[in-house]
């Protein structure tokens, strides 16, 4: 990194968002790029750990403090294992019906090209689990479209 150049850290992980799994993927990529671009990846382990725990945000730190099933003493301080546990946590907090709802509600924005719209739709399909669609899943999706209360839609 050039002298006098400052690279801001990634934004805190939005761990309680309705789309935690996608937020995690974006945070993880931003974190990896940040550690490489700043030379943090060459620092000693305690510096990397402290930086991650600072950058990741208060909500994610609270979640990390609940992890208790570490294989060995001190693993809660190993950055790769902390990242792995966070990834596992975020994957289980995915609202797939709401993801399909977002996909089905997505319309082309004014000024958005066909290619941009297609890319946006393709990105939305990543969280939809379309490969396991069955009649019960279709019914659930349809209920989401028919319910008027947006809060209920997020909680389905």
Image (cartoon, rainbow, N blue to C red):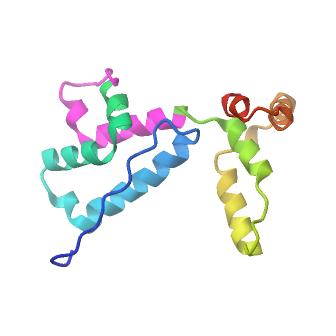
Residue 136 picture location, percent across and down: 83, 27
Across and down, in percent, residue 53 comes to: 26, 42
Q: Where is residue 120 in the image (x, y as percent from the top left)?
A: 68, 62
The answer to whether residue 97 is above or below residue 2 is: above
* Identity of the residue drawn at 86% across and 34% down: 146
Please give left or right for residue 39 compared with residue 102 in the image.
left
**Residue ranking furthest to the top:** 68
On-image quarter of the N terminus: bottom left
Q: Is residue 94 left or right of residue 89?
A: right
Q: Is the magenta stretch mostly helix, strand or loop?
A: helix
Q: Position of residue 28 (x, y in %)?
A: 40, 51
**Does residue 31 sit above or below 119 in this rendering?**
above
Q: 52 above or below 2?
A: above
Determine which quarter of the picture holds residue 89.
top left
Residue 156, quarter of picture:
top right
Residue occupying image coordinates x 20% and y 64%:
39
Q: In which image quadrant can residue 60 be found?
A: top left
- Relative to the observer, which residue lies in front, 122 or 80? 122
- Residue most toward the front? 149
51, 6: nearer the viewer: 6
Q: Nearer the viewer, residue 92 or 18?
A: 18
Image-based side of 86 in relation to 36, left or right = right
Tell whether position 153 is magenta: no
Q: What stretch is highlighted in magenta?
A: 66-91
Q: How many marks?
A: 0
What's the residue at 52%, 40% (across, down)?
20
**Residue 87 among those drawn in magenta:** yes
């Amino acid at each position: 990194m050039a002298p006098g150049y400052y690279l801001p850290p990634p934004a805190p992980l939005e761990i309680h968002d309705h789309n935690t799994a996608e937020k995690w993927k974006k945070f993880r990529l931003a974190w990896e790029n940040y550690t490489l671009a700043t030379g943090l990846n060459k620092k000693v382990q305690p510096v990397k750990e402290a930086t991650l725990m600072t950058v990741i945000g208060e909500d994610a730190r609270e979640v990390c403090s609940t992890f208790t099933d570490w294989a060995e003493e001190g693993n809660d301080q190993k950055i790769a294992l902390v990242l792995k546990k966070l990834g596992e946590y975020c994957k289980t907090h995915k609202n797939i019906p709401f993801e399909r709802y977002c996909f089905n509600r997505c319309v082309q924005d004014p000024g958005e090209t066909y290619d941009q719209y297609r890319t946006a739709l393709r990105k939305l399909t990543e969280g939809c689990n379309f490969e396991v669609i069955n009649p019960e899943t279709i019914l659930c999706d349809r209920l989401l479209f028919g319910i008027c209360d947006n809060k209920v839609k997020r909680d389905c």
